[in-house]
Image (cartoon, rainbow, N blue to C red):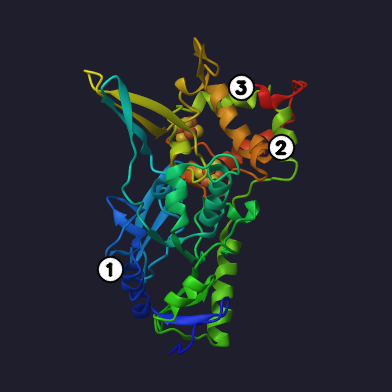
């Protein structure tokens, strides 16, 4: 048993039953636990009340345009790669009221939303998802502008990472340098080890809050065997991650590929459904919608997720700038992998593979980029493509 506060970064071992204590420990601190659960036919992230809701013994087969739940032959709690959608729906909800206004004589009174923000504890964040959250932090907690809902929720969140010991065929985090091991940004990090003899977790605290929670779970100091086995399991997941995206020089390559014929080929398959942007853990684009009562006494402004795949997304005074699917796919991919670097200092992709799995046409970002690399752009690019839609 741990008698003093565990040192940050020191490895401990926790039995699966000890992990069950994480729930009351977090709930006593006022956190709502959000974690993976089987809902319908997928593993998704949802508010969980008990440890028993975790997807014990389940995994998911994923390929381009395909997802299928499957039973494992053990009781692993985190034996799948990533949930169907990211965590952003909790920190950056799909719909949020910006403000409301109530008619007050000849003017309006602005009504602020005083409800306290939920305090979430995210259980089961993968390394790529931590990287995605760090990207959204740069976008939504900027120096000059912070998104209020995101800021309030992000501020109080407790993060329990899980190092991947399995990889889906759609994952390419290794080539994006975002995983499989969680490097930083977590309060606790777990590595699950399950076989016929044991079901344990190697656990380390990344912050003082994490250490305080860990001290309550009955963890023991990890021996060399547990440490080595955890390392081996993560390395095996790394070796399993076969999909790759070539990133060196990608910004210049994509800016030069504006007139590439491959955009027409992708557009012939793309349905412009926007699924890829909805499931992407870094996509953040929104629209604003104003609504009012018929008598004009009450009005509200809402912020809603939007997608660059809709025609209306690029609507400006009289028409849409990007009328063709070709221009919208090109915009999405070029922004994600090139212009994002100019705007935010990193790629906008963390290699989670969701846009590949959940694309109904099976369009694969890694494959499309590989084709662009293989076949040089035929024509000279305009001078500054960042301004071209
Ligand atoms: S672009 Fe695709 S692989 Fe990259 S972070 Fe978004 S959903 Fe994941
Ligand atoms: S790439 Fe796939 S998921 Fe994205 S808009 Fe096109 S069809 Fe939909």
| Quarter of the N terminus within the rendering | bottom left
Marks 1 & 2, CB-CB < 8 Å contact: no
Q: Is residue 145 left or right of residue 80?
A: right
Mark nearer the N terminus (1 vs 2): 1
- Mark 3 or mark 1, which is nearer the start of the sequence? 1
Q: Mark 3 points at which residue?
A: 389
Of residues 70 and 365, the one nearer the viewer is 365
**Disc 3: CA contacts within 10 A as few (<14), some (14-19) or many (>=20):** some
Q: Nearer the viewer, residue 373 or 35?
A: 35
* Cα–Cα span, label 1 and label 3: 49 Å
Q: Can residue 201 be seen in this view?
A: no
Which residue in the protein does label 2 denote? 251
Extreme residue toward the front, this view = 105
Q: Name the residue under label 1.
A: 52
Quarter-of-image position of residue 301: top left
In the image, what residue occupies the spot 30% across and 69% down?
Answer: 51
Instruction: Please tell me whether residue 62 is drawn above or below residue 235 in the rendered image.
Output: above
Label 3 vs 2, first from the N-terminus: 2
**Image location (x, y in percent) of residue 176:** 63, 51
Crowd rating for badge 1 (residues with CA inside 10 Å; few <14, some 14–19, many 20+): few
Query: Which mark, by number, is residue 358?
Result: none
Q: Which residue lies furthest to the left in this view?
A: 295
Q: Is the CB–ligand 2 distance for label 3 below 8 Å? A: no
Q: Residues within 10 Å of mark 2 (few under 14, many from 20)?
A: many
SS at circle 3: loop
């Amino acid at each position: 048993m741990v008698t003093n506060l565990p040192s940050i970064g020191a490895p401990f071992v926790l039995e699966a039953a000890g992990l069950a204590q994480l729930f009351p420990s977090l709930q006593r601190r006022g956190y709502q636990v959000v974690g993976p659960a089987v809902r319908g036919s997928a593993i998704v992230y949802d508010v969980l009340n008990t440890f028993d809701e975790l997807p014990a013994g389940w995994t998911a087969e994923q390929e381009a345009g395909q997802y299928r739940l499957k039973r494992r032959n053990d009781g692993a709690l985190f034996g799948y790669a990533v949930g169907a959608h990211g965590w952003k729906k909790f920190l950056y909800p799909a719909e949020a009221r910006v403000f409301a206004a109530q008619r007050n004589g000849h003017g309006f009174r602005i009504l602020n939303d005083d409800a306290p923000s939920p305090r979430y504890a995210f259980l089961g964040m993968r390394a790529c998802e931590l990287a995605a959250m760090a990207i959204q932090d740069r976008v939504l907690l900027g120096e000059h502008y912070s998104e209020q809902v995101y800021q309030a929720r992000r501020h109080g969140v407790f993060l329990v990472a899980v190092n991947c010991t399995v990889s889906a065929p759609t994952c390419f985090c290794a080539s994006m340098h975002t995983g499989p091991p969680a490097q930083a940004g977590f309060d606790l990090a777990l590595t699950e080890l399950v076989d016929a003899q044991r079901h344990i977790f190697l656990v380390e605290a990344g912050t003082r809050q994490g250490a305080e929670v860990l001290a309550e779970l009955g963890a023991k100091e990890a021996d060399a065997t547990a440490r080595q086995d955890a390392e081996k399991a993560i390395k095996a997941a790394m070796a399993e991650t076969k999909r790759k995206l070539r990133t060196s020089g990608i910004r210049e390559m994509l800016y030069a590929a504006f007139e590439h014929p491959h955009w027409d080929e992708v557009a012939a398959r793309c349905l412009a459904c926007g699924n890829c942007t909805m499931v992407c853990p870094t996509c953040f684009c929104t629209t604003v919608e104003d609504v009012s009562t018929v008598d004009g006494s009450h009005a509200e402004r809402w912020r809603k997720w939007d997608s660059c795949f809709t025609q209306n997304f690029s609507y400006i005074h009289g028409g849409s700038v990007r009328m063709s699917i070709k221009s919208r796919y090109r915009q999405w991919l070029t922004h994600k992998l090139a212009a994002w670097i100019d705007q935010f200092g990193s790629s906008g992709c963390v290699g989670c593979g969701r846009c590949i799995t959940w694309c109904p046409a099976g369009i694969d970002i890694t494959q499309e980029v590989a084709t662009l690399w293989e076949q040089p752009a035929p024509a000279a690019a305009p001078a500054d493509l960042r301004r071209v839609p």
